[in-house]
Image (tube, rainbow, N blue to C red):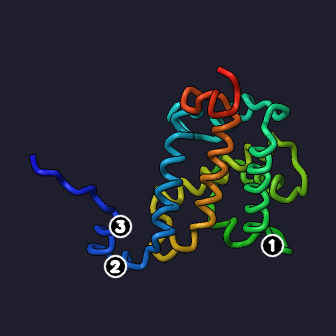
């Protein structure tokens, strides 16, 4: 049987869509990493049904005192990134509004966490998951143009790092204990 080359979405998009040739390699990699990490996160921690209620259950399983220092720093870096990205001297800017919060997405809660210079780790983790969820919904439901994807590289990279940190600190069957530095 003849070997078929691996399908390249980037090549297909470049050949068949208006504007598709302008997707940067970095944007393609960021989208790929994010979708892979989201898949792991949703299946490992949300029983394949991501929602704010599922994130609240995840946070309830978190034991902040047991979070390794490097992972705690990763979570801090994630929240700091979004504080700078979404806050303005006068409140919250267009980037925050473009998260397109829906009813039940706890926008007020996310705003309060991002507005605070210091919030409880559990609140920060929940706010992070909600932000990542909004990014996921915007990406998967077509609210980004090809050109806009190039502007989302740092945002999606930060979201992937955030997901990795959450997966590291919340027990699941996917992340092996040995890989979290614990003895099996």
Q: Is residue 75 left or right of residue 34?
A: right
Q: Which residue is mark 2?
A: 18
Query: Can you tell which quarter of the image residue 63 is in?
Result: top right
Image quarter in which the N terminus is found: top left
Q: Position of residue 82 (x, y in %)?
A: 73, 61
Q: Is residue 148 above or below residue 105?
A: below
Query: Can you tell which quarter of the image residue 176 is in?
Result: top right
What secondary structure is found at the residue carrying circle 1?
Answer: strand
Cα separation between marks 2 and 3:
13 Å
Q: Nearer the viewer, mark 1 or mark 3?
A: 3
Image quarter in which the C terminus is found: top right
Q: Position of residue 57 (x, y in %)?
A: 68, 31
What secondary structure is found at the residue carrying circle 3?
Answer: helix
- Mark 1 / mark 3, whichever is N-terminal: 3
Q: Is residue 123 above or below residue 140?
A: above
Q: Is residue 115 left or right of residue 22?
A: right
Q: Nearer the viewer, mark 2 or mark 3?
A: 3
- Mark 2 / mark 3, whichever is N-terminal: 3
Q: Is residue 16 above or below residue 125?
A: below
- Mark 1 / mark 2, whichever is N-terminal: 2
Query: Can you tell which quarter of the image residue 177 is in?
Result: top right
Could you say which disc has been placed on residue 10 in the image?
A: 3
Residue 179 vs residue 81, the one in the foreground = 179
Q: Is residue 166 above or below residue 35?
A: above
Cα separation between marks 1 and 3:
35 Å
Could you say which disc has been placed on residue 53 in the image?
A: none
The residue carrying pointer 1 sits among few (fewer than 14), some (14 to 19) or many (20 or more) residues within 10 Å by Cα, namely few
The residue carrying pointer 3 sits among few (fewer than 14), some (14 to 19) or many (20 or more) residues within 10 Å by Cα, namely some
Residue 61 vs residue 28, the one in the foreground = 28
Asked whether disc 2 touches disc 3, contact meaning CB atoms under 8 Å apart, the reply is: no
Point 79% across, 60% down: residue: 80
């Amino acid at each position: 049987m003849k070997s078929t080359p691996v399908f390249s979405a980037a090549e297909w998009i470049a050949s068949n869509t208006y504007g598709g040739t302008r997707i940067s390699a970095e944007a393609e990699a960021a989208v790929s990493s994010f979708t892979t990490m989201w898949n792991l996160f949703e299946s490992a921690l949300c029983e394949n049904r991501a929602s704010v209620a599922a994130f609240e259950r995840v946070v309830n399983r978190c034991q902040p005192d047991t979070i390794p220092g490097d992972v705690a720093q990763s979570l801090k870096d994630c929240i700091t990134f979004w504080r700078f990205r979404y806050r303005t001297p006068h409140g919250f800017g267009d980037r925050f509004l473009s998260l397109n919060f829906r009813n039940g997405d706890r926008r007020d809660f996310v705003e309060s966490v991002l507005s605070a210079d210091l919030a409880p780790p559990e609140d920060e983790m929940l706010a992070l998951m909600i932000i990542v969820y909004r990014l996921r919904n915007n990406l998967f439901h077509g609210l980004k143009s090809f050109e806009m994807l190039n502007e989302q590289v740092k945002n999606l990279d930060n979201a992937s790092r955030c997901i990795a940190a959450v997966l590291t600190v919340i027990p699941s069957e996917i992340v092996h204990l040995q890989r979290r530095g614990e003895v099996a």
